[in-house]
Image (tube, helix red, strand yellow):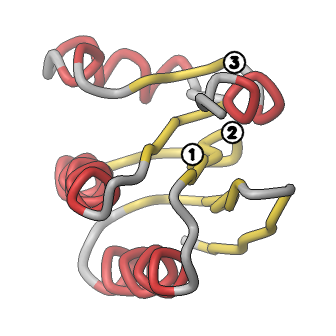
């Protein structure tokens, strides 16, 4: 998995690419998320548009990210969710806890304030 981030206004965007397997990927992702939260970011978009595959541990990584954001009075959105990941979210009923948007710009606009 490759990870990169960018800042647009008061929103941090984390771009994931490749296969999201958990393990070292989760450690890298959580490190980046905590870095952003510690720098004061309360709005985070996770861009999944270039994710080829995600394991159940990868789903757990997203759940943990959502929990981290909520515990820090922040919000998290998923964007560019591929059909495969959307199916995983639907089957596991996680679609009810994540806010998803078709594009990064739509995700950014969905934040309050």
Residue 31, position as x, y percentages in the image:
41, 87
Query: Picture quarter containing residue 79?
Result: top right
Residue toward you, 110 or 96: 110
On the question of residue 1 being in view, the answer is: yes
Among all residues in the image, which is located at the extreme front?
113
Q: Where is residue 89 in the image (x, y as percent from the top left)?
A: 29, 23
Q: On the picture, is 63 further left or further right than 32?
A: left
Q: Which of 10 and 36 is in front in this view?
A: 10
Cα gap from disc 2 to disc 1, whole angstroms: 8 Å
Dot 2: element: strand
Tell me the quadrant of the picture where the C terminus can be found.
top right
- What is the quadrant of residue 98 in the picture? top left
Is 45 situated above or below 29? above
Residue 102 is labelled as 3
Q: Earlier in the sequence, mark 3 or mark 1?
A: 1
The residue positioned 56% from the left and 53% from the top of the image is: 44
| Quarter of the image that includes the N terminus | bottom right
Between label 3 and label 1, give the one nearer the viewer.
Answer: 3
Characterize the local packing of mark 1: few (<14), some (14-19) or many (20 or more) Cα atoms within 10 angstroms.
some
Residue 112 in the figure: left or right of residue 13 = left
Q: Tell me the CA gap for discs 2 and 3.
A: 9 Å
Q: Where is residue 11 in the image (x, y as percent from the top left)?
A: 70, 54
For this orientation, the residue located farthest to the left is 92
Considering only vertical position in the picture, is 5 above or below 89? below
Helix, strand, or loop for circle 3? Answer: loop
Question: Would you say 30 lies left or right of 18 here?
Answer: left
Q: Residue at x 46, y 44 (%)?
A: 76
Would you identify the image quadrant in which residue 23 lies? bottom left
User: Which tag is nearer the camera, tag 2 or tag 3?
Assistant: 3
Ranked by sequence position, the earlier of labels 2 and 3 is 2
Q: Name the residue under label 1.
A: 52
In the picture of the structure, the residue carrying the numbered disc 2 is: 49
């Amino acid at each position: 998995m490759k990870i990169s981030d960018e800042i647009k206004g008061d929103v941090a965007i984390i771009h994931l690419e490749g296969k999201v397997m958990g393990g070292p990927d989760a450690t890298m992702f959580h490190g980046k998320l905590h870095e952003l939260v510690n720098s004061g970011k309360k709005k985070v978009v996770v861009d999944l548009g270039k994710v080829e595959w995600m394991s159940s541990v990868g789903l757990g990584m997203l759940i943990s990210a959502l929990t981290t954001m909520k515990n820090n009075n922040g919000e998290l959105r998923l964007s560019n969710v591929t059909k495969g990941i959307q199916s995983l979210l639907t089957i596991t009923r996680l679609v009810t806890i994540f806010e998803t948007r078709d594009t990064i710009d739509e995700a950014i606009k969905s934040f309050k304030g």
